[in-house]
Amino acid sequence: MNGKLNILFISEYDGITSSVLQKLKIYEYNVKSILIEDDLNVKSILLEPSWDIILTDYQGWIYYGSDILRIIKRNSLKKSYIIIGKQIEEKEMVSLIERGISDYIKEDNLQRLIPTIKREIKSISIMNGLNKFHFSQCLLEDEFQRLLKVSNFLIYKLDLHANFLEVNQVFNDLLKYNELEILDSFNVYELLHPEDEPIFTENIKKASEGEYIKDAEYRFKKKNGDYVLLSSILAPIFNEQNHIVGILCVSKDMTEYINTQHFIEDRIHRQEMLAKFGLEAIAEKNIDTLFNKATSLLSEILNVEYTKVLELLPNHKYLKLRAGVGWNDGLVGNATVENNKNSQAGYTLLKTTPVIVENLNKETRFFAPKLLADHDVVSGMSVIIPGKDTPFGILGAHTSKHRKFSKDDINFLQSIANILADIIIRLSTEEELRRSEEKYRTLTEQSLLGTIIIANGEIIFANEGVSKILGFSIDELLTWDINTIGQHIHPQDLKKAIEEYEMILNGDIPSLQTEIRMEKKQNDYLHTRQYIKKIQFQGESALHINIIDISEQKKNEKLLEASLEEKEILLKEIHHRVKNNLQIISSLIVLQEEHIDDEDIISIFRDFQSRIKAMALIHQILYNSEDFSKIDLPKYIKDLINNLFKAYSARSKRIDLRLNIEDIDLSLDQAISCGLIINELVSNSLKHAFSREDQGKIGVSLKKRENNMLFLEVYDNGRGFPKNLDYQQSSTLGLKLINTITRQMDGKITFEKVDGARVIITWEIKK
């Protein structure tokens, strides 16, 4: 650290920014302030050697904090990271310190800033001195022995007969053997999974002939009999005469990676199923069909034998088994559970929060009701299905096996319950509206049609029907002239009524139907529908007007409009929730990356992020759309590819993108499938087709062909596919995903290796 202190400040422009800059400039520090932007390349900025201290406001932490900590750690940068932000809880502040930030300074306590910076300067200087000492000490050790002791990988030597010569402590710790057991008793084949023996033998042979083997995957048996997957490098060991005398193996435990991959795949699958169920629920008119779909979905996703919908009966004393999976014949629709604190369902309603049971036999909060006891239920969970004014009932999932349900399990169960609640309320409202409309139709049929005849500006005929509608007697109506009629028409409708009456009398049109508000005898207005035509009455031109009271219908139309608007809002909210849940998954992946140093695993995580963003993007577009029935396909694909080009900005700057996307009407499922395939193929081209210095082109074409066939073409002029690529048997997740989606769509896929790489996929557009 020579000369002035160099400080990088990443923030939004607000009051706190100017205050911080003013304090720093008083001490003549070199300060560079950078605005938060979507395309800000944090890594390239942080790797500039001049920065001693990194400052961000709280928004900067939200945007870039994880990246900053990872870059500092991975590149062993001697930099301090300080956050200046709002008041936060003490446990969150402790968590930030544990994750690696140097300090957290509250906005209202900026006087701490300069002393903190001075403390960090001293700390960096001390650490630089210690690192030089440790480096010189390491030079005194034998390099291989040092590697055995400090490496986080499994390291072991084999002779040419695959006997163990030496293993490190990481090897012993993972497989749970001691070193003597390994060296005295074991040949490597005793630990190797039988299915992996052929490929291992082949690689041992190659290494013994001087070849270096990378990314070889084998399963080794632990002492308890379980197998662990290892990704390995094999290298020949030479003696002083340059003869190969053994093989050095360096292996990495893939268990955490596999578990993380399964966790993310499960999260994505659950969100997809929630989104699909939500869309199906909106279209469903039969509540029992919806309950059956919900309980079947819960049984499949949560892997439980029993699921149930319990409906709270009107007396609130019992809950009836309305729908379910796994229960004995005759119980669904008939079995009941008491609504009191002694049952799990009653306890859930009482507590108003989700209830989880690990072992019903040892449960002390309530007893097992007969329904659960008769099916040997051990573990389960239950949540409330909300209602309009009171809860509708309980949604539950149970198993006869001992199980600890996770927070994700509860969240999935509650999400299904919330969707059910929304649909129950909507269908209930629609049923009330239907009954009201039926009542209106009955009343209309039973009532008399109102009729009046106007001639020479006076009512000359009125029947009993119009008398009942307006509340005036027939004798009173026969005293009305055109002015009196006008006085009983709503002021806002008067001009329109006069114009329409004149049009009929003048013969401009033969007849018309109109709606006019008229005043009743009780001084309130009602909506009427009037059918007007010109007739000859007693030798004179006259207006014949039939009048119907449609006030109740107008009221119902408003209720219907409100219900439709509620349905649109609900659909929009579901798209919004799906988009937000997918973004949460993307954020969880970013948090997971902080604990991983392996670039290959991080690359896989980022591939997952791009797939999640591809699905989230279409829900974002639908959320912002006025028409949920049509997806703006060109915009979706353009935005999707632009996001990929931003994500791979270092590689994409010299790439010419060519798009030819027709505006094709696809269903939501087909659009998501199309987006996922394009995401995989374009990201693959960006990652593998070109070097950083290459100029190249990537093209995407989407067209509708004859017989309602969709034609998708993605191509580049880069390196092309590997010679030995078998796209149908590939183990890469990307190709598996492309093949799986294509099969699901009954499509056909073609890989071409001419002038780069070209993939053509066709399938029938289905509604």
Image (tube, helix red, strand yellow):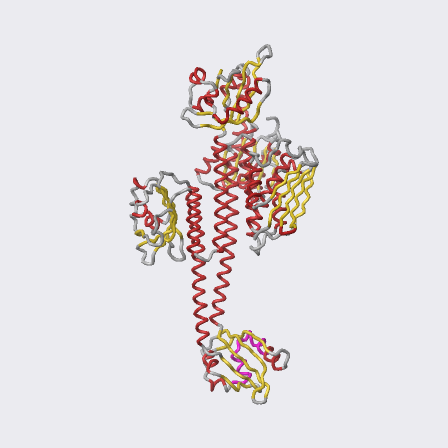
Quadrant, the N terminus: top right
Does the magenta segment cover residue 222?
A: no
Locate residue 20: give its quadrant: top right
471 vs 182: above or below: below
Viewer-proximal residue among 699 and 515? 699
Is residue 704 among what the camera can see? yes
* Residue 203, percent from left and from top: 55, 22
Position of 699 with respect to 548 (left or right) is right
Q: Which residues are magenta?
A: 480-498
Position of 696 with respect to 175 (left or right) is right
Magenta stretch, overall SS: helix
Position of 457 with respect to 652 (left or right) is left
- Residue at 41 percent of width and 49 percent of height: 295
Locate residue 34: give its quadrant: top right
627 vs 147: above or below: below
Which residue is outermost to the bottom?
Answer: 539
Viewer-proximal residue among 281 and 141? 281
Is residue 28 among what the camera can see? no
* Residue 422, percent from left and from top: 45, 54
Viewer-proximal residue among 186 and 683? 186
